[in-house]
Image: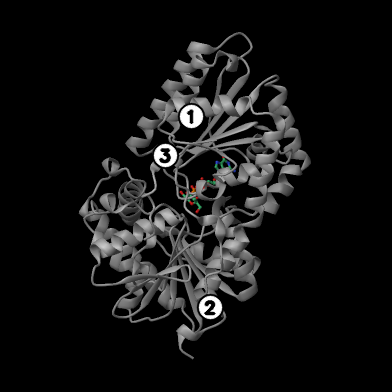
Amino acid sequence: MHDSERTHLERLMIVSNRLPVVFQREDDRLTWRSGSGGLVTALAPVLRDRGGLWIGWSGLPSSDQDEVDDALSESSAATGYELKAVPLTEEELELYYHGFANEVLWPLFHDLQSHCNFQPEYWHSYLQVNRKFAMHIKRQLQAGDYIWVHDYHLMNVAAELRELELDTPVGFFLHIPFPPPDIFVKLPWRFHILRALLSYDLVGFQTMRDKRNFVQCLRMLMKEYPVRSTGGFHICSTEVRDVRIGVFPISIDYHDFERRARHKDVSEAAWYIHEHLQQQQIVLGIDRLDYTKGIPYRLKAFRNALRRFPELQESMTLVQVVVPSRTDIAKYNALKIEIESLVSEINGEFTRSGWVPIHYIFRHLTRTELLGYYRTAEIALITPIKDGMNLVAKEYCACNIEDNGVLILSEFAGTAAQLHKHALLVNPYDVEGVAEALRDAFSMPYDERAERMRQLRSSVRRYDIYRWVERFLEAAISRHLADYPVVAEYIPPDYGDDFGASV
Ligand code: GDG
């Protein structure tokens, strides 16, 4: 049977930069535990049921590879699917991962080209590491496998597989945004990256915005390959394949978050947090330390709200959690200093006996603490300047079991496409607008909060991570794209009628 006529999946091969396990060294022995992200939760049962394999870097230096391989065979027996590590050298990590992935693709795809460091050595290493992944895939490949590659670190994998003369179906999902043409063209390797993505059979994006940007880039830079729209997909026809391009907004394991939020430990953590902030509405911000998260603008908006709406003083507390990340990179360290100086300025200006306006936490929270904050915060302030999706927004809704929270959400987060009707949408650069949203959230009557939150929770429950996996695989295997009405692009009312005209 030809691959294009397949109607079911024999074995699923997931490929991502990191494996879904975390290694630890205990008494000179390597132990492992399962990773905790939504992707692992959603894919693990699929891999177990259908038979599967996950390929990625272990997180450890390549000198530990033999030990890693042994530990992975043990873990494969426990997880019910196989795990295979791709060893990466220190130099590859420096150039491919810290360099090309984090200093070129990450900022550029978040529209921040001024943060990019377009070093040719980074690019060469990116190609080399993607080739290495392709060779590992080839070694493991069996007839009937479907390969699903994840994220911006590995865009060139299918092109390398084609170089190795493998015509197996390969799908790709981009977790971060795809930039508009004016920004994408700055990439010195723009043609190569577009051609690389056209080596996949199916390319998935988080939102219509990202798909539109990609299709516009193809139309502008790849004129020889026509793109047409049909049955929910766009299809780009190259000499060798019809590449389907679709939208698959990622989600969370809603029921798991809700169940955990009801757990006694979380209830106690939530009670404890509020016990120490009595008569306060808690505003929660949770972000990895990253310049895409818009934390300085958010702090300025909070200050603006306290200045313009004095009734908020001593009645509202911002809990801003910043999870340490990439602190060895100078730009990230500078961001940390900027955040900490704003926090201390604002606290210096407004603190009164018994009330400190910003509680600033710079560490990774335990799961119980995190869910405690989600459950108890009256307002979530999620204002990235650009984000592929933003799972924190969905997790907050899932855990808000009392239906009394208000979600203030950036219109530039992928989540806005799905949740814009019942969240308070803001432009994160608009300090005064965000301050007004804080005031509106603070004074929103209980009935309105409850109705909005019920709608938000119902949407996240309906379109959960399991549905996301099913939908991608259905599109990949049966070539059918099931309806998914929530992905209609969010267009702010003041953009005018021409914006977002269909591509
Ligand atoms: C990419 C895209 C897209 C956060 N702080 C703590 C903690 N977290 C967990 C949250 C959530 C996850 O980290 C962050 O999810 P995001 O969606 O915000 O972003 P990333 O996973 O970094 O990145 C993004 C996503 O892929 C999925 O496609 O949404 O746009 O950039 O799950 O719960 N967990 C714990 N303590 C913390 O302090 N335990």
Marks 2, 3: nearer the viewer:
3
Q: Which residue is mark 1?
A: 434
Name the outermost residue toward the front.
Answer: 497
Q: CA distance from mark 1 to mark 2?
A: 44 Å
Percent x, y of residue 446: 71, 31
* Residue 52 vertical position relative to residue 86 in the rendered view, above or below: below
Question: Could you tell me the amino acid type at mark 2?
Answer: Ser
* Residue 494 vertical position relative to residue 142 in the rendered view, above or below: above
Q: Residue at x 55, y 82 (%)?
A: 7
Percent x, y of residue 307: 49, 15
Marks 1, 2: nearer the viewer:
1
Is residue 92 visible in this depiction of the protein? yes
Question: Could you tell me the amino acid type at mark 1?
Answer: Val
Is residue 28 visible in this depiction of the protein? no
Q: Residue at x 28, y 54 (%)?
A: 181
Q: Residue at x 39, y 37 (%)?
A: 291
Q: Circle 2 — which element? A: loop
For the residue pair 383 and 230, the one nearer the viewer reads as: 230
Percent x, y of residue 355: 61, 14
Q: Residues within 10 Å of mark 3 (few under 14, many from 20)?
A: few
Q: CA distance from mark 1 to mark 3?
A: 16 Å
Compare marks 2 and 3 and give the one earlier in the sequence.
2
Q: Which residue is mark 2?
A: 478
Q: CA distance from mark 2 to mark 3?
A: 40 Å
Percent x, y of residue 358: 54, 22
In this rendering, would 245 be left or right of 91?
Answer: right
* Residue 421 vertical position relative to residue 373 in the rendered view, above or below: below
